[in-house]
Image (cartoon, rainbow, N blue to C red):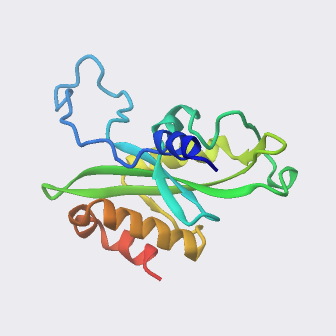
Amino acid sequence: MDLFDDKKKDKKRGQGFNILSSDSNAGHGGYGAGTLNLNNVSPVFIDVEEGEAFVDMGALHARSSVEKGIKFLNEKDQVPNGKPYWLVWVTVDHVEGKPAYRGVAACELTVDREIRRGYKSLPEHVNNMDKSLKGRILVSQMDDKSKRILMDYLKNFNQEMWENSSDQLKEELTL
């Protein structure tokens, strides 16, 4: 891999979360009320083999660096040599007036770049994003290595948000 590839890789993989924003509909219920607000959700990818986590906002529209150029199939066994990833929807919000990781929901996917095929369950991805937005914690299906990577990433990104997060999140990610 040459220097150009490293720069290209760094450009595709962001390291930040969406910043907490004030709700423009705060309590009035007028135009735009009831719409889905994605301002506080960030997609965190866990590359299981590389042992790293990164944010790629393109995942909000299924256009992340992991997903680009891949035709996704509904059956995992149709991609037997797929590289394993977790896409974790992380919602940041205020809990008792303090910023915290409020919702965290993981989805499995695999990618085989050689055959340009992958596996993911689109309904699972959509439903888990919704659950994250609603403050649910769904990480029990993740393997221990991936949980550790996610926990370290969240802690290192912002220790205060980690400390303000629910005990359930901390317990489910702590091995």
Q: Position of residue 121 (x, y in %)?
A: 68, 46
Find residue 150 and report its horizontal and vertical position in percent. Answer: 46, 65
Residue 123 place in picture, x, y as percent: 63, 42
Which residue lies most toward the front here?
Answer: 2
User: Where 110 sits versus 153, above or below?
Assistant: above
The residue depicted at 49 percent of the width and 58 percent of the height is: 53
Q: Residue at x 71, y 33 (%)?
A: 69
User: Which one is in front, 78 or 141?
Assistant: 78
Image location (x, y in percent) of residue 130:
46, 44
Residue drawn where x is 74% and y is 48% of the image: 119
Q: Is residue 87 left or right of residue 164?
A: right
Tell me which residue sits at (48%, 68%) in the image. Answer: 149
101 and 82: which is toward the camera: 82
Q: Nearer the viewer, residue 128 or 40?
A: 40
Q: Is residue 138 shown above or below 93?
A: below
In the picture, measured across the screen, residue 166 lies left or right of residue 109, that is: left
- Indicate whether 77 appears above or below 71: below
Q: Residue furthest bottom?
A: 175
Looking at the image, residue 141 sits to the left or right of residue 32; the answer is: right
Q: Which of the 4 image quarters holds residue 156? A: bottom left
In the displayed orientation, state which residue is furthest to the top.
Answer: 31
